[in-house]
Amino acid sequence: MAADAKELEEIVGGLSGSQKQISPKYFYDQRGSQLFDDITQLPEYYLTNTELAIMRDNIAEMSKLIGKQASLIEFGSGSSIKARILLENLSELAAYVPVDISKEHLLAFAAEIRDCFPHIDVLPVVADFTQQYELPTPMVMSVRNIVYFPGSTIGNFEHEVAIELLRVMYHEAGKGGALLIGVDLQKDPTIIENAYNDSAGTTAEFNLNMLQHLNRDYGANFDVDEFEHSANYDSDEGRVVIELVSQADQYFEIGDTKFDIADREAILTEYSHKYTLGGFAEMANSAGFVVEKVWTDTDDLFSVQLLTRN
Ligand code: AVJ
């Protein structure tokens, strides 16, 4: 993706405050998406495998609760394996609407899904899913909308913003609709910290690649070797804090803007919130949802939840 004035402004703004930060969406250039795929295969990264197992083990009940002739609307369609489990098992799906900001990615993915599921009406929407957007009308009458938001991506957003995003999903679900969402749970901090500090160093590479991405596409000149990956679980806040820590007093530039960064000073690149079932239910309720069903694994590492609205 080429530099975009609005994004550049967002990046410069985030680095101008007393806590330097860059949005986690800048992880995902081509290299970053590949590295994230690698992360999902790491032995320490329990999230993806656990969520997939929960989906597979409970798909019959999920399908029953969702009912016939639903429209499936996926927020951020990077997670094709999980969506495929739903596409293969939901009965008489009216439509599949993958929503993603990356047009090329999305259209290629939609074509693939059409090939595998010729009987499903695939209606890709290019949009930033954190904003409200117009839904396309499926060819077949749909009984209800099921918004799908897997991967505990909700955990990237701070409390108030997460509730706002749940409200957007509430709106897109419409009357009688529901949200099927993957939610990572609070647990032994060691398990959590290991998932973000893997022994192969893939998460470190993923984090550092953000600087390379800014160098390649946004006219930055970070000396990537002078930064170090850091991920710590803050159990009071219930979140992993992921940072890039400067290894020297140094400066970097983005376009015409110059930034000083001190030795040991950190750039915040991501929060990954972990929830209690009660805490997440409160957030869901604030957005208007009722928790209809929670599926977990036997170790209560992760949950998939069906939230409904009137
Ligand atoms: C894609 C936001 C769910 O928080 O676990 C993985 C991203 N960051 N390793 C997460 C991530 C570092 C991931 N989410």
Image (spheres, helix red, strand yellow):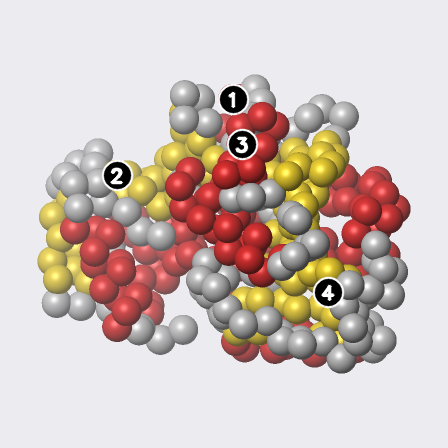
**Residue 117 visible here:** yes
Q: CA distance from mark 2 to mark 1?
A: 22 Å
Q: CA distance from mark 2 to mark 4?
A: 43 Å
Name the residue that disc number 2 marks.
266
- Label 1 environment density (alpha carbons within 10 Å; few <14, some 14–19, many ≥20): some
Q: Which disc is residue 189 wearing? A: 1
Q: Comparing marks 1 and 4, which lies closer to the viewer?
A: 4
Question: Which of the pair 166/204 is nearer the observer?
Answer: 166
- Label 3 environment density (alpha carbons within 10 Å; few <14, some 14–19, many ≥20): some
Looking at the image, is 277 positioned above or below residue 249?
above
The image quadrant of residue 265 is top left
Query: Helix or strand or loop: what does disc 3 sit on?
Result: helix
Q: Which disc is residue 159 wearing? A: none
Q: Comparing marks 1 and 3, which lies closer to the viewer?
A: 3
Q: Position of residue 273 (x, y in %)?
A: 48, 35
Are circles 1 and 3 on residues that touch, CB within 8 Å? no
